[in-house]
Image (cartoon, coloured by chain):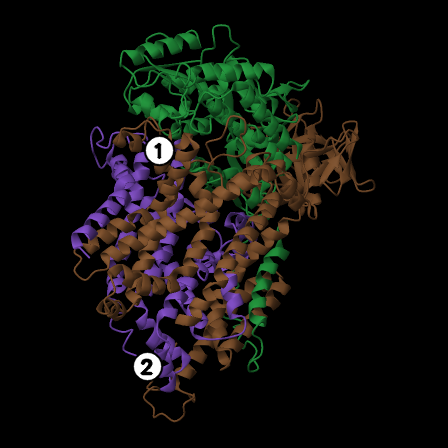
Amino acid sequence: MRNRTLGTAALATLTLAVTACGGGSPAPSAAPTGSATAPTAAPADKGGGQLVIWADPNRVKALKPFADQFGAENGVTVEVKEISKDNQQTFLTASQQGSGPDVMVGAHDWIGNLVQNGAIDPVNLTEQQKAAFPEIALKAVTFDGQVYAAPYAVENIALIRNTELAPDAPATLEDMVAKGKELKEAGKVKEILCLPVAQKGDAFHVYPIFAAGGGSLFGTTPAGDPDPKKVLLGSAESVKAFGRLKELGEKGDGALKTSITNENYVATFAGGRCAFLVSGPWAMGDVKKGGISYDITPVPSFKDGKPATPFVGVQSFFVAAKGRNKTLAQEFVANYVTNKDVAKALYDADPRPPALTAALQEVQAADADAGKFMDAGKDGFPMPAIPEMQAVWEPFGIAEAAVVKGGDAAKAAEAAQKTIDGSLKN
Amino acid sequence: MRLALRHVFVLVVCAFALFPIVFVVSAAINPLGTLASTDLLPNGASLANFADLFGSDVHPFGRWFLNSVFIALTASFAGLLLSMSAAYAFSRMRFRGRRVGLLALLLIQMFPQFLAIVTIFIIFTEVTELYPAFGFDTAWGLILLYLGGALGVNTWLMKGFLDTVPRELDEAATVDGATHAQIFWRVIMPLVTPILAVTAMLAFIGTMSEFIMASVFLRDPGSKTLAVGMYGMIAGDQRNANFGMFAAATLLTAIPTVGAFLWLQRYIVSGLTSGAVKG
Amino acid sequence: MTSDVPEAAKPRRAPRPRREITTAYVVTRIAVLAVTAAILVYAVPPLVAARAWIALAVLVAVTAAIVCLYLTRRLIPAKYLVPGTVLLIAFQLFPILYTVSTAFTNFGDGHRGDKQSAVTAIETGSVRQAPGSPEYTLTAALRGDELVFLLVDPETRRVQTGSGEGLAPLEGARLGVTGKVLAAPGLTVLTAPQAAARGAEIAALAVPTAGGLIKANGLSRAVEGRAALDYDPACDCVRGDGDTWTADEARGYFLNARGEHLAQGWQVGVGLDNFARVLTNPTISGYFAGVFGWNVVFALASVVTTFGLGMGVALALHHPRMRGTRFYRIALILPYAMPSFAMLLVWRDLFNRDFGLVNQSLGLTVDWMGEPVTARFAVILVNLWLGFPYMFLVTTGALQAIPRELTEAASIDGASPWHAFRRVTLPLLLVALTPLLISSFAFNFNNFNAIQLTSEGGPFPAENPQVGATDLLITYTFRLAFGTGGAQFGFAAAISVFIFAIVALISVVTFRRTRRQEEVYA
């Protein structure tokens, strides 16, 4: 697996440079070989007692104490390293070359791609352990009938509203837009709805509204999983849904705008210049800093619409297939992080609702938001973990941005469908 | 030319240069620090973001700062030596393969680099195992990697400058019996201080802000450079939460660069005017 | 490294220098030998320990060659070129060659490793717990030197030993509250740290049973599982779940009769397929001309504007009576001192229609990044901001190298300042800077970040999500290779080769014209 020959090849190319200028006086062949002087600089005898965990910067600190405790209990050293860029690809590349971690932390929708690259092993949870998780979390980490990760947080978006500006939760999207417009005309807010669209669209945030309008991404297999062979973005229902997005867009109600982006949507809401925000638990830090009173409810649907189901994402621990210490990694993932205290510590570091039902209940007692987010996501749709989903995000987003700017819904949907079909064929 | 006009022109360009930076300053002193604040004067200015930056145990900013300065200084100094030597050979000597070599240097720069990450893993997985001191998560390994790029553009830059230094100078020294090494160190080097200073500056800045290689190379929180650490601050959905700190960090990043510039400035502008025509 | 030896002070004898054995000579040779010895002492033992004989041979050969180079009096250019070149080859040229070599494979997501890894992954991934089998509590123990599993059925609390031979009942074991075995007659029970240290052995042990294999699942549990899929080398196929998947060496997948493949694939050579795909891909060929045109405009505009502005301010400051230059210079290099990825993001937000500072300060409502013309203008402007300090620094340095006497002579001759600039200053500047301008062109031609972090290639027309108005060749082709359907490194490498060929061709043609210049001024 590790590619010693290639490493050697790299060294070998070094010779090319030198052989080019061969000649000169005969060499007093590299003389001194300090035989006894150099204590063999130990070629790091890992494998035995070391567990390496990779996580993103925000979780490193929360994991550290538990990693150390695990290390002390098992007489091993545990290193937590942080990766901040292209985590999934970096993990895959590093694993392939043999310098990856034993345990990886990431989102459940990586699973399809990690599995097709043979980068992770199934995680064997007992029936008892499985029962400790809500169904949706388990469903998310199950791929091809096999559990591939231990979930630790479940997150989804919901409608967060400023209760001073909008005391009542809107029953429908129409109500929400009407209220927003009214507030805007009264000069109380600057924007009707804070939902990021940006120039390239944001499929994740707009999906509940798209689903409410009747749109869908994939058909379903008999087993109930998304079927990558049936991309439905160009279907008549989806065209109608894109039409609804267009009505909400810049040439229509003005609730969806390309100028509202990931950078400004939470800040605008937190600054009180917008009564409605569609976002997830990660926005709550800023919302609280803004000092406004708020409530969290599910994203409403259209009056005659389908349910506005949000995507559900599950943060998870994976066991690397090419790790050096898989027994320890299995022990850590299956038997250690599925424990309530770890889930709560991770919640404290970054408040996303814990996946463990018991931990969630405790957290809820102190922080009602976590439960409200869970409620908003209980009928949610786990982000498809199939590798084919990677082909959908961008064309979907661009089609969204196009209709929000007033483009033709049918054309945009058809173009997105064509692009996705084209790339899935390859 | 009229001085006043020069001042007006330079001031306009300075305004252009500073425009987005003013925005970063405003974000850095805004306690609610977000990338979205449209008001230049934030509602309440404070140095809280700076305090957070140094008080944070998630982001060991002080360490990143030292790491960056160390790596940038070492890599730019060593890189300068390498590229200066090469430039001297290319400018002053005539040998087989010279044009080809120069052309190759130029062309290598043109290959899109970011697929190279796979290879970096191939090489350094092996190195980490054999020589941990130069492996992943070490400053020395990263410096080595950066030195691989030292010959690239800098050689061309310095060769271009060397070509403008009259050859009579070193020919005279050769006649005086000086060796090539003596000419290099005693005649050429002093003559080209402005160029050395400029190149050192460029190399320093380049290393300070490099983050694509560094981000795959440095994974220990304590081993990171500023660019990598700061990228982590705003990676993913953390962008809003940390933007104030990020803006503060961006401003502090400029300090070593400006310091280096102040130090090198006198070499840049005093340089050669006296030396060049003496020969 | 010459020390202070009065060699230059020696009486002249011949027009060609005669070198003799000086202290400096001896010192440098000793230094070379010492450095070499140090490198060998450091580098050899790990290679010996790892039994990497080829690498060792290469190392010794390279070191010998380098020693030889610095001990001989000949090959002077090589002495100056080798240190940088060695590093260049290892960290730039080798990666490029490797990348190019992947263009001939299907290397990418789903096809990263070799076939063996794919088979392992398929089998491991298909292991299911045997229906109705207990979830054993595991304790690792030693029987003599042999590692065995002590397996406790949590319901019946019956204890069995598991070894390579199979299961055997065990009597007289003492159990703790967690169900782990604390002590057993004739066996040494391993503590957690002891077991952890034997992680690899524990992972390797498989206890055969009637229904499959019992394998450890971490350190404290074991399950009886059975691989649903099995690789059979005889037919080079994978069987199981009532189906058969046969290896297809051309695609690097196991395929069944219906043409469906198993998720895990492996890397195979595909010859020129990736190159053919670049040439025949309807998206690439259909939009090539337009994107190429804009790409050239973008790169040229970036070079011309950055050089123009950088040189302009450098010239403006290059005046003996100019005051405040220190302040100006600092302000002018600040854009270059900020991390560029951060500033690109900042600029993108400055150009936001409703929230951006640009519109607010100018009182406009332009959707900068939303309209093709303004988006193109904006990305060039941003690139100008990022790039002009570089040109400013370089020109400032180059201006110092131009003897003031020359420009003064020109003005005494009665030339206007503009004339003096055109006739004297600019040509001299261009001698030093032409190669930089060429490489700046090449850099901007492939300036992925400048586009990706600002406009992301957009705006996109509603009817085509694949090619936006500000897309460069590298952004829209890499979107095909990475944005959709996972990372396809082989395809991306083939794209890189084509783009490289285009840039290199343009550059070489330009470069050839510099030869004359160099010979005139050198």
Tell me the residue at 55%/22% (across/down). Answer: A411
Chain letter of the brown region: C
Tell me the residue at 64%/35% (across/down). Answer: A116
Question: For numbered disc 2, what is the local secondary structure?
Answer: loop
- Between the residue at mark 1 and the residue at mark 2, the CA separation in whole angstroms equals 58 Å
Give residue C412's position: percent from left, percent from top: 22, 69
Tell me the residue at 52%/43% (across/down). Answer: C292
- Disc 2: which chain? C
Q: Is residue A288 left or right of residue C139?
A: left
Res. C216 image quadrant: top right
Going by the numbered disc 2, the residue's amino acid type is Asp
Residue annotated with mark 1: C349
- Badge 1 or badge 2: first in the primary sequence: 2
- Disc on res. A357: none
Give residue A76's position: percent from left, percent from top: 51, 44
Res. B36 image quadrant: top left
- Disc on res. C4: 2
Between residue B34 and residue C500, name the one nearer to us: C500
Chain letter of the purple region: B
Between residue C76 and residue A82, name the one nearer to us: C76
Chain letter of the green region: A
Question: For numbered disc 1, what is the local secondary structure?
Answer: helix
- Disc 1: which chain? C
